[in-house]
Amino acid sequence: MRSKNVNRNSLQYIKRARIIILAVYASIVLFTLLFFSRFAVEKSDDIMKNKVVSLTSSLSVQMKLNMESYMSRMENIAILAFGEKLAYTYDATDPKNDEYESINTEKIITEKLYNLCIMENFVDYGIVYANNRTVGKISNGTSSLFGDTLYIELAGMIEGKKGDETWFTGYEGNFKRIYYVKRVHENAILFISFYADELNEVFDNPETLSDMDIYLVNNEYNILYSKSGDEVGSMLPEEISSLIGDKKDASYMNNDYLVSINSCGDWYVVCSIPTDIIMIETRNIRRNFYLFAILAAAIAFIIGFYCSTLIIKPVSEMVADLDDKAQIDRLTEVMNKLTFEDFASNCLRNSLDSENKALIIFDIDNFKGVNDTLGHAAGDKMLREMGNVLKSIFTEDDYIGRIGGDEFCVLVNSKPKEGKSFEEYIEEKCTMFNTLFDENEVSKEMNYMVTASEGISLSPKNGKDFETLYKLCDKALYESKGQGKNTYTFYKG
């Protein structure tokens, strides 16, 4: 009996010990799995946060560059007014003026300004003199807003400004128009204006960050532009402005918002998105993973390994997808401006003096006419065709990017076949492009003739850094435009 009792007691002890060991083991395994699961998820959160902060910062910088490019384009159009000598020499305040000659002179200047005005959706494009006499297109809204003090107020805007020019908005609380003002001479000021909602094409955020709000604000954080338009003139939301404080050109994040700010002249581009939105995916993953970990305690090692793969894989794929979309222009599927400039700059920086390279700017002639006549959908189709033609002509060694609305840029990194000079090679590429683009299927489909012009600079002949070559390309492009468009021009400095 003793032996049986001992055996029975031993079996019960073993059973109890087994149960205790299994319970302790299961608890240890479950605790360990939950502990490492939490650690893995938090690390994934950190990675995701860092990536989203980086992508948001990149987007904010891209928006700043878009805005600077847009402002530069407006300034260049304003400068075109000086192509008419009378525009910068005529003085309506001169007491020696003959009234009849003054009327004729002002008529000539007005016709010139009206011709330039149709290049963009300008509300105003004119010159105002110290005696408040005006030429060009001056809207009733501007006349009503400024009244007889138009010249005085505009002069006050640029007083003390470097270069006698400035951008401003918010006069008398009206933030719906944006003005660019430039002094012509001591008694005359040129100014242009357009509605703030014209900036919609500048601040077009990608689908991956479609919930991001983009603002253009002044030093006092008055909103000069927002996607909805309803907030123009109001103050930047307190929860966003308080996060920024007096900091500039950086990204900031708390439990409520991720905010990036970049200076743009006297104004700032602010991008913000709720933290809950950018972290919702990882939080869903965390919840599902913890539930699965509890149910999978019996096979913790296998499930733990499997779940770690599950949590890392979607986050990696998500980050890789966001990286791709942050680098590629989603409409044309070529590099965006920021990525192109980075790749092109590095390529030029690392090239030898014996290596020939070329930077080419491609600009669609009269592209605004496509949008105005056929609609923006047709314009987008034409831009996609532009990207396709460029990809069909240039090689995998070359870099292709979209750097503006209808402006593309190529860094030719490939080499010509033996027996052909590098310049002949570039001429062949540009000629081929013009031929294919002139005959593209989109133009035939829309029955609308569209051409393109090119400006070319060579490295190391014209320079070795991207910024220098780009400026020279831009000058060559203007020569192409001036020669009647649909042609290419090498920079001849």
Image (cartoon, rainbow, N blue to C red):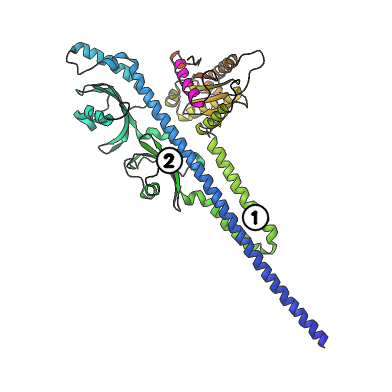
Classify mark 2: helix, strand or loop.
loop
The amino acid marked with disc number 2 is Asp
Q: Position of residue 245 (x, y in %)?
A: 37, 47
* Amino acid bearing label 1: Cys
Under tag 1, what secondary structure? helix
- The x and y percentages for residue 93 are 19, 18
Q: Is residue 216 something that shows in the picture? A: yes
Q: Residue 307: give its label.
A: 1
Q: Residue at horizontal 50%, vertical 40%?
A: 207
- 437 shown above or below 43: above
Task: Give the magenta range.
Answer: 464-479
Kindly tell me whether residue 140 is visible in this rendering: no
Looking at the image, which is closer to me, 124 or 262?
A: 262
Residue on which disc 2 sits: 249
Whichever of callouts 2 and 1 sits on the residue coming sooner in the sequence is 2
Classify residue 269 by image quadrant.
Answer: top left
Provide residue 212's location: percent of width, then percent of height: 45, 44
